[in-house]
Amino acid sequence: MSSSYWNISGIMPRYPRLDRDEQTDIVVIGGGITGLTAAYLLKQAGKRVMVLERNRLASIDTASTTAHLTSVVDLPPSALVKSFGADHARAVWDAGFASIAQIAHIVNAEQIDCRFDYVKGYLHAPLAEKEPKDRDRTLEREAEAVAELGFDARFIDRAPFIDRPAVEIDHQARFHPAAYLRRLAAAIDCDNCGIYEESPADEVESDPIVVVSNGHRIQADYVVIATHNPIVGKSTFLGATLLQTKLALYTSYAVSGRVERGKVPDALFWDTGDPYRYLRIDRAEDHDQVIYGGEDHKTGQAGDGAARFAALEGALVRLVPDITLTHRWAGQVIETNDGLPFIGETSPRQFVATGFSGNGITFGTLAAMMARDCVTGVKNPWAELFDTGRTKVVGGLWDYLKENADYPYYMVRDRFAGPKGKSLRHLPRGTGRILELEGKRVAAYRHRDGELTLLSPTCTHLGCQVEWNDTDHTWDCPCHGSRFSPTGDVLAGPAEKALEERTITEGMEVKTADDK
């Protein structure tokens, strides 16, 4: 019963120990979500890669995950804005969405059967406490903070199943990490690239870079350290020690059990307690597996693990009385001094990623994307924000979207960004906006005479979402530059077809709104 539900060792195949000297482009140290994703992306970028894992692949920290794929970080949205400014806060949430989009892309490209699906997320009031009168207003403010950053979120009086006030957030996701990583490992371990288990990085030399493992030497151009809690590598001892002073290690607990399918909504849940609790399901073939976690404490500073498991199991049984408990396990999360991860180079040609807090899967994937960009010389929009040498990230003028508009993620960003409203009531004459009407996104334009034109916001070239250009009064595609008139006609390619017309229900009161 004291084992992870994910059954990593039963799903991941075995890989050999390193038993010879090698030469490669990149050595990735660590075979969890960060290391395997980095190796996969670097191989896709044309690099020869070798992965060294001290134990079995994904058997330590990744095996302990609850595998929430989420943009919701541990810092509340309002606190994130207060500490770092709106642009930086938006960038942090964007990083989560970019990671989810990257995972979705890999799932589709490799045709991975890992139960990936998009779901809603709910940040809700704790179950165990009486609801204070100001709880609703606090959650309303958090919902407003998320919406002001441009993402789909709203306050609801009662979240499904949990029955507490909550912030409902769209475009979160879940998957089965072992099934996902099994396919990534298979894609890595071929074509002159390799994976080695039971092969710790005993030493990392510099000039040239040589990683020593099992008495054998791998010469490389670059090293990626993906060990969750970073090893020294080729950094100076002082530099590595300084980074460690900015990290705090916590132990988190999880329990799991079987229930009849459909008993618990397919969604992600977190409460606002400190420490907080979190819940999700995994949809198996003939049942649902409910996964419930929390009870965090600083590693090594509590000896009551059995009591913490019992507290989680008791709370889960109260939530789902007919559950059959099957698993319990504990893992480690790493917090940082300012709440943001450290991702980037710690010395020339050495990349490190750590401090993912409760977002190990999404930040691990993001770190892999950033490692690929660093190695290949591509500008990454989060490099400054998560830089390992930062002293303090402050709010201020940083045109985040403008500076990073060419990054591939922004070709799909608007699929996750919130609409500019849900009513035509405040759409001025001579103006266009992306709105959500009757559950669908609409490119809405109000002519000078008050007449409305409603169009699909999807560019007819490759499907990106158009944006309103208030200077030229055109619908412009941010991906490849197509431009359309307010009525949807093509003004400039590469698009060749006009934007499709949209209709709304006859008699809908917003049709006749007349803003003067």
Image (spheres, rainbow, N blue to C red):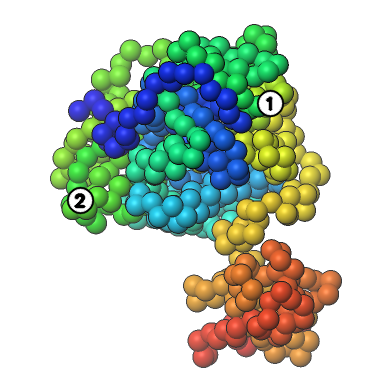
Across and down, in percent, residue 494 comes to 71, 74
Front-most of residues 193 and 106: 193
Three-letter code for the amino acid on which mark 2 is drawn: His
Q: Earlier in the sequence, mark 2 or mark 1?
A: 2
Confirm whether residue 166 shows in the render: no
Seen in the picture, residue 199 relative to 405 is either above or below; the reply is above
Q: Circle 2 sits on which residue? A: 287
The residue under the point 72% across, 36% down is 384
Q: Circle 1 sits on which residue? A: 349
| Image quadrant assignment for residue 16 | top left
Across and down, in percent, residue 354 comes to 56, 27
Quote the CA–CA distance across marks 2 and 1: 47 Å
The residue under the point 27% across, 43% down is 290
The residue under the point 18% across, 53% down is 286
| Image quadrant assignment for residue 237 | top right
Quarter of the image for the N terminus: give it.
top left
Seen in the picture, residue 119 relative to 226 is either above or below; the reply is below
